[in-house]
Image: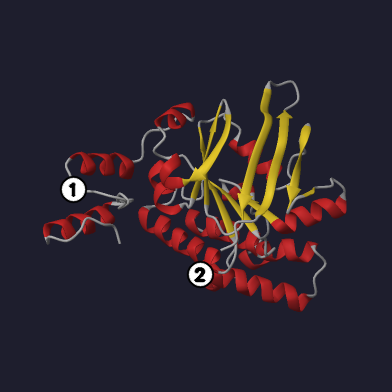
């Protein structure tokens, strides 16, 4: 896949009125086709960063760029940014407001001035992608929490963004709901959507993401997830613990059960597969 930079912050600073600086001279990139996990302690600026990327906030200094071109903060420029980048906030109730699921998902495309035929096609496509076609006429106030989450995401992807940013998308979901959502995100990625997920769950980030960005007082540090999430110095700066999979891999290596370039397990299932392969006399590896 291409690793071109789709959207970026270049030397961006931001301060809320009557508050201390939240971001100062921050550089941050979202690369096409790379699933990116954004991690940091509460108050580190994750929400501000996401709102800057999606056009909800305007930086005090520096610039936001889309494919290398600076964003203009007029109607045309913001429309272009918001059709490229869509943000889904953590609480779906902050994003849903229409009477029914179908009406809510259609809101964005209608505001783009698309034809009724195109709007209907986008709504149908988005509902199918989130596996909620059967809920099209369901009143939003009668949805379960997981259904509301899916509806909010459907409304975002109906805009056909190239970058989808999700703020703690698995928060509040039971294990089955989390797995179903992750499968949905895998489908979106396969269809060409670049996904950014803000999360506090380092185990999820290690398992799901290609890259990880850790927000620390010294800035944003981004790189391949396995390497970044093994950096105890950066994890401490971001207020995070060592991921389960990294700790297990280190233990396996000290016992000689994991050797060479073989990656460590990212989930209990991968650990079980690794253990089974070792017990059978095979080389230690993760499928």
Could you tell me if residue 108 is visible in this image? yes
Question: Residue 36 at x, y = what percent?
Answer: 53, 50
Instruction: Give the class, few, some or many, for how many residues have Cα within 10 Å of label 2's Cα (few <14, many ≥20).
Output: some
* The furthest residue to the front: 260
The quadrant in which residue 48 appears is top right
Residue drawn at 72 percent across, 39 percent down: 10
Mark 2 sits on what residue?
A: 131
Which one is closest to the eye, mark 1 or mark 2?
1
Q: Quadrant of the C terminus?
A: bottom left
Q: Quadrant of the N terminus?
A: bottom right
Identify the residue at horizontal 67%, vertical 72% (top origin). 122
Most foreground residue, 202 or 224: 224
Q: From the viewer's perspective, is 220 left or right of 232?
A: right
Q: Callout 1 environment at 10 Å: few (<14), some (14 to 19), or many (20+)?
A: some
Can residue 201 be seen here? The reply is no
Cα–Cα gap, marks 1 and 2? 41 Å
CB within 8 Å, label 1 to label 2: no
**Residue 285 at x, y = what percent?**
26, 57
On residue 257, the disc is: 1
Residue reaching furthest to the bottom:
117
In the rendered view, does 171 fall on the left or right side of 159? left
Q: In terms of secondary structure, where does tag 1 sit?
A: loop
The percent coordinates of residue 211 (x first, y second) are 50, 48
**Secondary structure category for the residue under label 2:** loop
Measured as percent of width and height from the top left, residue 66 is found at: 74, 52
User: Observer-nearest residue: 238 or 152?
Assistant: 238
Does residue 42 sit above or below 63 in this rendering?
above
Residue 220, picture quadrant: top right
Viewer-nearest residue: 195 or 16: 195
């Amino acid at each position: 896949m291409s690793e071109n930079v789709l959207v970026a912050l270049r030397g961006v600073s931001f301060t809320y009125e009557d508050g201390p600086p939240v971001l100062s001279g921050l550089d941050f990139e979202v690369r096409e086709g790379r699933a990116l996990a954004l991690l940091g302690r509460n108050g580190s600026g994750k929400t501000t960063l996401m709102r800057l990327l999606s056009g909800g906030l305007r930086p005090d200094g520096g610039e936001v760029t889309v494919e290398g071109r600076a964003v203009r903060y007029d109607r045309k420029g913001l429309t272009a940014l918001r059709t490229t980048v869509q943000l889904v906030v953590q609480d779906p109730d902050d994003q849903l407001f229409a009477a029914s699921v179908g009406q809510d998902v259609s809101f964005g495309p209608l505001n783009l001035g698309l034809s009724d035929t195109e709007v209907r096609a986008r709504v149908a496509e988005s509902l199918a992608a989130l596996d909620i076609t059967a809920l099209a006429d369901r009143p939003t106030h009668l949805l379960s929490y997981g259904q509301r989450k899916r509806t909010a995401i459907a409304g975002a992807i109906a805009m056909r963004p190239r970058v989808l940013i999700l703020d703690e998308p698995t928060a509040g979901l039971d294990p089955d709901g989390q797995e179903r959502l992750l499968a949905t995100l895998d489908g979106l990625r396969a269809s060409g959507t670049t996904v950014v997920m803000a999360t506090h769950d380092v185990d999820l980030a290690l398992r799901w993401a290609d890259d990880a960005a850790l927000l620390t007082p010294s800035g944003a540090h981004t790189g391949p997830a396995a390497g970044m999430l093994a950096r105890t110095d950066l994890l401490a700066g971001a207020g995070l613990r060592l991921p389960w999979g990294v700790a297990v891999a280190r233990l396996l290596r000290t016992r000689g059960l994991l050797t060479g370039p073989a990656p460590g397990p990212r989930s209990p299932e991968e650990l079980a597969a690794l253990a089974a392969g070792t017990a059978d006399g095979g080389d230690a590896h993760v499928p």
